[in-house]
């Protein structure tokens, strides 16, 4: 579409408005110049600086003013016309569309402020922002990070995963899927999970019992949303996984916190809670409790299943790091036993392979999975089914199994190393060696408040958590999970050396 050059109209408009200022362009920007012009025109229309019916400069004159090619201006006007911001009058030129509302004008030389400030100007329902893992402001990424227990992605078969992803992506281009059919996850990965979980964890399931998610947190949220209503009671450990507790509270559930000791959740306390309240859900992390890393004993596992039957409550079993165990074969999950369909089992490849591999899974009776898929459709139509397919191939080829053997050996060596290093800080840091997982529960002497320790360490290039005061158990408030898996032995030794200097300097 062309826009006529009309000297009389052009002169009148250009004299009224400083288009070289209002339509400022950045030739270094990745956004095309014609879109910059179009967006600037839209902004000054919205701000009332140009009224409906106002004529715009001709394309030649505007190109001259902005020192750009005329075709660029034509493209900008075409874009504005396509979006109905301007009208084109034959033999006259382009003008601001007549049907736009007449907005209150803003002076052209007033600063143009963003519509997005600090606060929303209409009511909404904010989340509780309290968090146990907040840290002092860090101006630059620290050299060393002692996380709370994540895998070392350098050991993971990411090259194989990326290669398979590319292969699957080429195949996916020719495939068609009906809308909503992938909300439960890639069919290939769901099939792979059936055999993988049978071989590794003794779960006797079929594909209709599986659902693929973006991780354990998504699984917890979906499961809790289907199991709980406002006012329902949920039993959790004290302390327990903070973000799971936040999910339950957000849904309006009432938390019943029961003690966690060296053998896991106290089943006497669970029974007493069930006698006092109608319990709907119990959330448990039996393999390596979060945050304390303890393992639920076999006796307590059996009793938990019995209490579930007796008091008719569901169990959400979070088994986020089942793959890593160093002293003996791990106890099989609660979900592998006879639980009469009461256990919702949750796992995650984000915790076993790499944090960037956002794939988790949920195992439950078929009717529950169908409802979970329907709920997921409301917020997320599907995951990355190409990535899910690629992971399924690595599982079926044995690549994941080989990687886990390598990672277990490496993490075992790293566990030995950190335990030896922390022994030198005995009296300041108290801990028990975990049987598996990727973290140590380190309890700091109260004379060494973690908030101050974290600040001093950050100044020396080391990040550590500021403590778990928000986890509900004040006895363990000056404690942190010290992840040992993500750093190699040399890196961990350097990190512990910094921590040791901070502690021995008495902060």
Image (cartoon, rainbow, N blue to C red):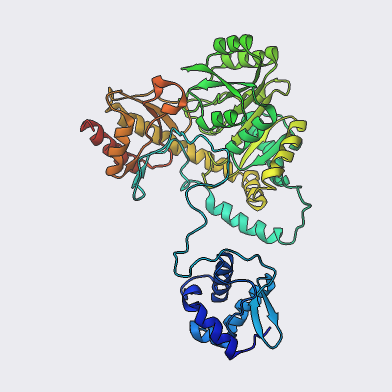
Q: The N terminus is located in which quarter?
A: bottom right
**Which one is nearer the viewer's eye here, 273 or 300?**
273
**Which one is nearer the viewer's eye here, 393 or 492?**
492
Residue 183 placed where, x, y %? 71, 45
491 displayed left or right of 319: left
Asked if 445 appears above or below 39 in the picture, the reply is above
Residue 238 placed where, x, y %? 49, 20
Q: In this view of the protein, can residue 69 be seen by the observer?
A: no
Question: Residue at 64% of width from left, 22% of height from top?
Answer: 231
Q: The C terminus is located in which quarter?
A: top left
Asked if 105 appears above or below 254 in the picture, the reply is below
Residue 140 placed where, x, y %? 34, 50
Q: So how many labels did they put on this image?
A: 0
Residue 380 placed where, x, y %? 67, 46
Question: Residue at 58% of width from left, 65% of height from top?
Answer: 46
**Which one is nearer the viewer's eye here, 457 or 256?**
256
Residue ranking furthest to the left? 505
Q: In this view of the protein, can residue 476 be seen by the observer?
A: yes
Residue 227: quadrant of the picture: top right
103 displayed left or right of 470: right
Question: Residue at 35% of width from left, 34% of height from top?
Answer: 417
207 displayed left or right of 495: right
Asked if 422 appears above or below 261 in the picture, the reply is below
């Amino acid at each position: 579409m062309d826009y006529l050059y009309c000297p009389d109209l052009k002169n009148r408009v250009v004299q009224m408005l400083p288009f070289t200022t209002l339509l400022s362009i950045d030739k270094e920007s990745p956004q095309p110049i014609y879109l910059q012009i179009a967006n600037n025109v839209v902004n000054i229309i919205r701000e009332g600086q140009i009224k409906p019916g106002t004529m715009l400069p001709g394309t030649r004159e505007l190109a001259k003013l902005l020192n750009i090619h005329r075709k660029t201006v034509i493209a900008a006007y075409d874009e504005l016309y396509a979006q109905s911001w301007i009208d084109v009058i034959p033999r006259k030129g382009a003008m601001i569309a007549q049907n736009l509302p007449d907005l209150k004008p803003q002076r052209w030389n007033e600063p143009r402020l963003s519509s997005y400030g600090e606060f929303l100007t209409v009511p909404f329902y904010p989340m509780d922002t309290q968090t146990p893992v907040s840290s002092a402001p860090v101006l630059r990424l620290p050299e060393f990070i002692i996380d709370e227990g994540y895998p070392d992605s350098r050991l993971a078969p990411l090259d194989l995963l990326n290669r398979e992803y590319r292969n699957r992506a080429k195949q996916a281009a020719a495939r068609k899927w009906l809308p909503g059919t992938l909300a439960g996850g890639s069919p290939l990965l769901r099939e792979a999970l059936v055999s993988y979980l049978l071989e590794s964890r003794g779960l006797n399931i079929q594909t209709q019992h599986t659902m693929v998610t973006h991780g354990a947190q998504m699984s917890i949220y979906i499961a809790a949303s289907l199991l709980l209503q406002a006012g329902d009671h949920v039993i959790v450990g004290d302390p327990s996984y903070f973000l799971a507790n936040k999910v339950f509270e957000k849904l309006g559930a009432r938390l019943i916190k029961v003690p966690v000791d060296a053998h896991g959740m106290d089943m006497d306390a669970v029974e007493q809670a069930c006698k006092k309240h109608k319990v709907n859900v119990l959330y448990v992390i039996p393999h390596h409790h979060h945050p304390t890393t303890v393992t639920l004993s076999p006796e307590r596992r059996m009793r938990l299943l019995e209490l579930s039957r007796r008091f008719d409550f569901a169990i959400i079993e979070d088994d986020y790091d089942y793959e890593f165990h160093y002293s003996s074969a791990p106890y099989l999950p609660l979900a592998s036993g006879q639980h009469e369909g009461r256990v919702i089992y949750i796992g995650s490849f984000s915790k076993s392979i790499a944090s960037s591999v956002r794939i988790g899974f949920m195992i439950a009776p078929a009717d529950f999975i169908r409802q979970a898929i329907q709920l997921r459709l409301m917020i997320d139509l599907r995951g990355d089914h190409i990535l899910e397919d690629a992971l399924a191939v690595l599982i079926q080829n044995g690549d994941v199994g080989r990687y886990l053997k390598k990672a277990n050996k490496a993490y075992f060596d790293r566990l030995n190393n950190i335990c030896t290093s922390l022994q030198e800080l005995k009296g300041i840091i108290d801990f028990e060696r975990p049987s598996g997982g990727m973290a140590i529960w380190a309890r700091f002497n109260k004379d060494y408040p973690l908030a101050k320790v974290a600040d001093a360490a950050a100044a020396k290039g080391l990040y550590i958590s500021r403590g778990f005061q928000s986890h509900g158990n004040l006895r363990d408030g000056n404690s942190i999970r010290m992840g040992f898996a993500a750093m190699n032995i040399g890196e961990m030794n350097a990190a512990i050396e910094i921590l040791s200097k901070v502690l021995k300097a008495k902060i």
